[in-house]
Image: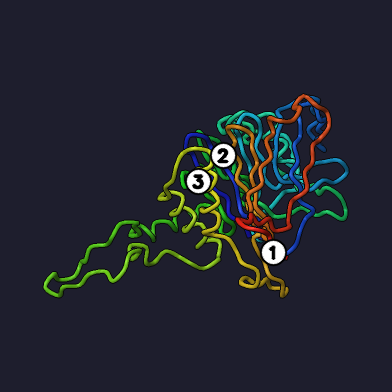
Amino acid sequence: MCTSIAMKTTDFYFGRNLDLEYSFGERIVITPRQYPLSFRKAGSMKKHYAMIGMAAIAENYPLYAEACNEMGLCIAGLNFPENAFYPRNGEKNKVEISPFELPLWVLSQCGNSKQAKELLQKTQLIDLPFGKDMPLTPLHWHIADDQGSIVLESTREGMMIYDNPAGVLTNNPPFPFQRENLRQYLNLTVHYPESRWDHAMGLSPFGVGMGTIGLPGDYSPASRFVRAAFLRWNSRGEDGEKGSVGRFFHLLSGVAMMDGIVETKDGKFEKTSYSCCMNASRGIYYYTSYENRQITGIDMQKENLESGEMKIYPLLRDEQIRWENEKTP
């Protein structure tokens, strides 16, 4: 399970919690403009937009979980079991793309969310695994920039593209339910509540925060969607880089999973393996891991983006502690 968020302050920020019970070999990967990209049924590209994100690498191919390109367009794939469906063959006059290719397909050639939507309308996701030992993961995708946010879902009803003014995404059920479900929480408020009872009773709140009574606190996808949307809409902070990044990680922490709290049906426990925040306006990837809560940053613009070689950074998992006095053993 996962949660993604899009947020605009002075710059545009996009990121997610990756909630899993295992590691998929994730690393921070910069794919420069001249790294050759090949698609199983859509040819190849010798030059394209540069991008940065979290990915596993198989046969020198970056399999991005989430990424942004140098134009500020972002994408994240989130688990969508039992609902995701990829047909064997695409519709006539549409380009056939495998789900594992989708982040590269979109970010390599689209400079904004409008172009992404236009490209996706001409694209068909199909059932084409990376290899025999790497089946497709059931996903849906959050795609956003500073001008808009959309959701892409491929189900048995077809491939749907939804506008997403909430700016967040979680997992099941499909997006139309998540959007409709928000209507049940119109009473929520950050303000100090006023009594609707007879004033003669003299009732008043016995503490702050009571305007949010009813805000879901469990870890189900529908509840995390409501909580993330409410926090995103109402959060405050400085608009500078440090303030925005700090605010974004606070948003993610509001829907993060602690180890031992959410058990899967096979007896394992999911946790927020890592959280990330991308300043898509500047091409900076920030992250924390479950074990290392200190924010680490990687700036794509400090690399040679005209290169033909990927730049790879390992995920730092050892806890980094800043000592104010002499470090104790």
Look at the image and tell me in which quarter the N terminus lies: bottom right
In the image, what residue occupies the spot 65% across and 69% down?
259
Q: Which residue is mark 3?
A: 167
Marked residue nearer the N-terminal end (3 or 1): 3
Q: Could you tell me which secondary element the residue under label 2 belongs to?
A: strand
3 or 1: mark nearer the eye:
1
Query: Between marks 2 and 3, how big is the CA–CA gap?
Result: 8 Å
Identify which residue, 256 or 313, lies in the foreground.
Answer: 313
Q: Residue furthest left?
A: 200
Q: Hey, what amino acid is under mark 1?
A: Thr
Q: Quadrant of residue 182?
A: bottom left
Q: Could you tell me which secondary element the residue under label 1 belongs to?
A: loop
Residue 273 visible, this angle: no
Q: Could you tell me which secondary element the residue under label 3 belongs to?
A: loop
Q: Which residue is mark 2?
A: 144
Q: Determine crowd level at label 2: few under 14, some 14-19, many 20+ residues with C-alpha closer than 10 A.
A: many
Q: Hey, what amino acid is under mark 2?
A: Ala
Q: Hey, what amino acid is under mark 3?
A: Gly
Q: Quadrant of residue 302?
A: top right
Is residue 92 left or right of 257 when viewed as pictured? right
Q: Is residue 63 above or below residue 18?
A: above
Tell me if label 2 and label 3 are in contact, CB under 8 Å: yes
Q: Determine crowd level at label 1: few under 14, some 14-19, many 20+ residues with C-alpha closer than 10 A.
A: few
Q: Is residue 65 above or below residue 241?
A: below
> x%, y% of residue 69?
66, 33
Q: Which mark is residue 328?
A: 1
Is residue 80 left or right of 63 when viewed as pictured? left
